[in-house]
């Protein structure tokens, strides 16, 4: 999550949706924020305490956290935006990300089918880097009653165009968006990873996201 009081925006960062690129591109704006020093000190204190002080929004906070913590008049005037991603594509990205950066978690996994079954197994012990990317994306953008709180939902599939639109609404010139952490070890077409059975497993788990965001297994034309 990235908050700027000077530019009145709140970016909700869902894992594996291009959010690192968006956040890093907008972060320089915070240097001009009169509250930047206070935010920086809170961030450092949070880190030094092992994040036990409750003074910083975690990177992947849901929007309800900001609604509960910020004064209503502050929250309401913010331009709130998020990026979402096709759930089938997101799981392929997660597969390569975990295998590349935390291979010890997948030492017993050989195939993508096994990965999905293991990842969605309700008996599997919680692991942050695994479970973050099986949370429903829709949970990040709604309040406790299911009302959507964001003003703009960009799509990973149109990352550059939608980032420019978000910057236009913020009222700043869009900086160059570097696609950071882009995987180079995966096939471009996520559909090639799926059997019909595993595609249906993912469809059932992310049914609410698929309905709200209008995604289908086949990519947009």
Image (cartoon, rainbow, N blue to C red):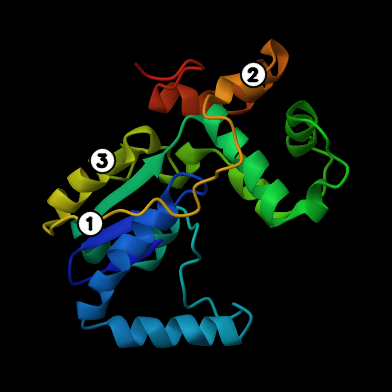
Residue annotated with mark 2: 199
In-front residue for pair 28/130: 28
Residue 63 in sight here: no
Residue annotated with mark 1: 76
Residue 62 in sight here: yes
The quadrant in which the N terminus is found is bottom left
Label located before the other in sequence (3 or 1):
1
Nearer to us of marks 2 and 1 is 2
In-front residue for pair 180/14: 180
Nearer to us of marks 3 and 1 is 3
Could you tell me which residue is drawn at 47 percent across and 74 percent down? Answer: 56
Q: Residues within 10 Å of mark 2 (few under 14, many from 20)?
A: some
Secondary structure under the numbered disc 3 in the rendered image: helix
Residue annotated with mark 3: 162
- Above-or-below relation of 216 to 155: above
Numbered badge on residue 186: none
């Amino acid at each position: 999550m990235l908050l700027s009081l000077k530019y009145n925006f709140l970016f909700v960062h869902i894992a594996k949706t291009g959010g690192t690129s968006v956040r890093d591109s907008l972060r320089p704006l915070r240097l001009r924020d009169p509250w930047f020093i206070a935010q920086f000190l809170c961030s450092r204190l949070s880190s030094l305490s092992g994040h036990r002080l409750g003074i910083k929004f975690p990177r992947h906070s849901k929007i309800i956290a900001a609604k509960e913590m910020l004064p209503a008049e502050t929250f309401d005037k913010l331009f709130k935006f998020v990026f979402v991603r096709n759930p089938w594509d997101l799981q392929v990205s997660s597969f390569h990300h975990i295998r590349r950066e935390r291979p010890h978690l997948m030492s017993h996994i050989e195939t993508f089918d096994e990965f999905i079954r293991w990842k969605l197994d309700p008996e599997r012990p919680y692991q942050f880097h695994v479970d973050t990317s099986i949370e429903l994306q829709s949970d990040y953008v709604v309040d406790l009653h299911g009302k959507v709180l964001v003003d703009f939902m960009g799509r990973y599939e149109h990352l550059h165009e939608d980032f420019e639109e978000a910057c236009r609404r913020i009222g700043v010139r869009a900086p160059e968006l570097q696609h950071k952490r882009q995987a180079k070890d995966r096939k471009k077409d996520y559909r090639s990873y799926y059997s019909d059975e595993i595609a249906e497993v993912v469809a059932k788990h992310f049914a609410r996201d698929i309905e709200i965001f209008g995604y289908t297994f086949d990519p947009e034309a």
